[in-house]
Image: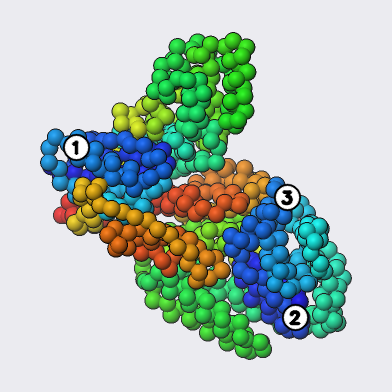
Amino acid sequence: MLTFPQMGNLERLLGDILERLEVEYMPPPKTTAKTLALGTKHAPEFSCLPLKINIGNFIEALDAGADTLLMAGGKGPCRFGYYAEIEDRILKDAGYDFEMVTVEPPSMGFTRFVGPIKRVSGKSTRQIWKILRASFPKCRGFDFLEKKALETRCFELNIGDTTKALKKAMDILSEAKKPEEIKEAIDAGLNVIDSVSCDKDRLVLKVGFVGEFYILLEPFVNFDVEEWLGNRGVMVDRSVYITDWIGPSAKNPVAGTSDDELAEIAKPYLGHSVGGEGLPSIAHTMLYAREGFDGVIHMFPFTCMPDTIAKAILGKVGKDLDIPILHFTIDEQTGKAGVATRLEAFLDLLAGRRRALVN
Amino acid sequence: MQCYLGVDVGSVSTNLVILDEVGHVVESVYVRTQGQPIVAVQEGLQQLEAGLNQAVDIIGVGTTGSARHLSGVIVGADIVKNEITAHAVAASQEVPGVQVVLEIGGQDSKIILLDNGVVVDFAMNTVCAAGTGSFLDHQSARLGIPIEDFGKHALKAEDGAMIAGRCSVFAESDMIHKQQVGYGLEDIVFGLCQALVRNYLNNLAKGKDIKTPIAFQGGVASNSGMKRAFEEALKEEIHVPEHHAVMGAIGAAILAKEEMLLDPRPTAFRGFGTAKLDYRTTSFACGGCENNCEVIKILVDDKVLARWGGRCGKWEVDHIRRQNLQPVGANCSTCEE
């Protein structure tokens, strides 16, 4: 019985791939305060929050009967590439019996990517390739639905309608299997979100959302900031999507700017990758400023090296390009009040700037 | 007389202010919160009413501070605002042209940068106890001098003793060492002020342009030693507004006034009689999903006034306010022509 970490909609994406691979799987229970408590108990105190939540997810899944853990690998400088190995040791030391399956990115050698999948599924390389190609458009579809919801929520007439529509749209897409079904389901899903009653003439603030991948994608750790802002009539543009990240092209069709373009944009401030989302955080902030966004929210885990570097540089970017940036360093805290106070003040700041521009 | 009420319920103090229509402070009170925000608000309302020597008609109420939602329900607020915005608004009124607001409260501290009355940047510290009023409170108790006299002692010092300000634990052991080798009380007291200022500037002001005029407010601004330490560190004059300890409440009252001008309606104020009502809070675990959130209920006479605490918002009784982008005065009845 295979399981994997929880992260945003990963469950829907991986679920589809694993079903096609005919691998028995169970997603871990949704991340809750209990997951976090389990993770912090077993993980090193100085490690970043994603590791702690991964471990919590795995423990809850192992307790529920999973025996094989699927984890992504990677190569530095971000510590994430090392997490599968660390999690394997921590959980074995804690007395759990399981097999860790680490899928490395194809850039580290194709066999290290496909080998582990072959082992758990018993399928040939050719079959796996076919399955991934069949599933990928559907995975992309989930990202496009999320993006659509972000563009819609700030205009909705009844708070909560878009969130309901998004869930319905995702459920429709989850059912689709064949290429033409997937196409139809994506269109149907987009239509569901489009039919939310909206006041498109309302003036809205536009905020870009940059930072570390896991924090941006997992609502449990980012205090549901996208929905929080959307409910208050603020349009959010997220810079990171799952399929952009795992897609081999590095063209990032969902967010809209390729890795090469991002590197070129960031050059005046940072000439090389620092791992993780360090460079993209800077490049996307610059893009948001150029596109006339009102502000940028930057979130990353405490002790995250790449985005800590980005934070230092963003101070200058914000000043030079005259765009307000609100930073959040995310750790084990679950109290929402401090985050809400800063967010509310930030929105007041942005609204004040907008009014000053108009007057 | 028609007036506006501002309520600021923080972790250490609860402040209430009545402003007249032109923004002058008619009456203000300062009560210790002592972990009981509802009782503190009721106590404050009672004191406020008792201190009034003329009849006032409250036509708008604003609440702020960490218990702003709770106190908003208790008093019946027309607007609930975060304390950063409230402090900035109050400083703009009390210190014309203010560009930097230094605010140090009991459990947190903030810096707010303004340009032409518009907030352009802010930072808030709640993680480091060494950068807040509690640090001085604790050390003054250790030294056996009342916190009210702290500033007086600090002003007598020639130079402060060098005390580590990075962390309150290090500061305390450093302070004990300095005492043991014979430093005078004045030098140690001022050294603590300097340590707090260093911590504050390192934590919050890093990379920010500190332009004048600078306002210093919050409970800690009563401490003249802190004012001196800021002036020496920044080499600029520091303004401590007359009502520095209740600036959050003043800001809330000003925001209430703006709100009522923008959207004229009868106030939601529940009256000074609120002080005598029996408010109760209870909590329950939702159980609707895996999160099992703890939801808080606020009741008066067994009637539910408000509920909150869940992640998904299904229990929330009060409605979410959308960010209003209308230019100030767009719907304002007083400027209709």
Q: In which quarter of the image is residue A257?
A: bottom right
The spot of residue B34 in percent (x, y) is: 40, 40
Q: Do the residues bearing badges 1 and 2 touch, measured as CB atoms within 8 Å?
A: no
Q: Nearer the viewer, mark 1 or mark 2?
A: 1
The spot of residue B323 in percent (x, y) is: 37, 58
Q: Quickly name the residue at label 1.
A: B50
With B226 as the anchor, is A106 left or right in this view? right
Identified by mark 2, the residue type is Glu
| Element carrying mark 2 | loop
Q: How crowded is mark 1: few (under 14 residues within 10 Å), some or many (20 or more)?
A: few
Identify the residue at image location x=48%, y=49%.
A338
Work out how far the residue at label 3 is from the one at label 2, CA to CA, in angstroms. 31 Å
Q: Is residue A143 above or below residue A206?
A: below
Chain letter of mark 1 equals B
Give the position of the C terminus of chain B as an image quadrant.
bottom left
Residue A251 visible to an observer of this rendering: no
Q: Quickly name the residue at label 3.
A: A44
Q: Quadrant of residue B172?
A: top right
The label on residue B111 is none
Q: Quickly name the residue at label 2.
A: A24
Q: In this view, does A46 lie above or below B169?
A: below
| Element carrying mark 3 | loop
Identify the residue at image location x=52%, y=49%.
A326
Give the position of the N terminus of chain B as an image quadrant.
top left
With B112 as the anchor, is B244 left or right in this view? left
Chain letter of mark 3 equals A
Identify the residue at image location x=22%, y=53%.
B270
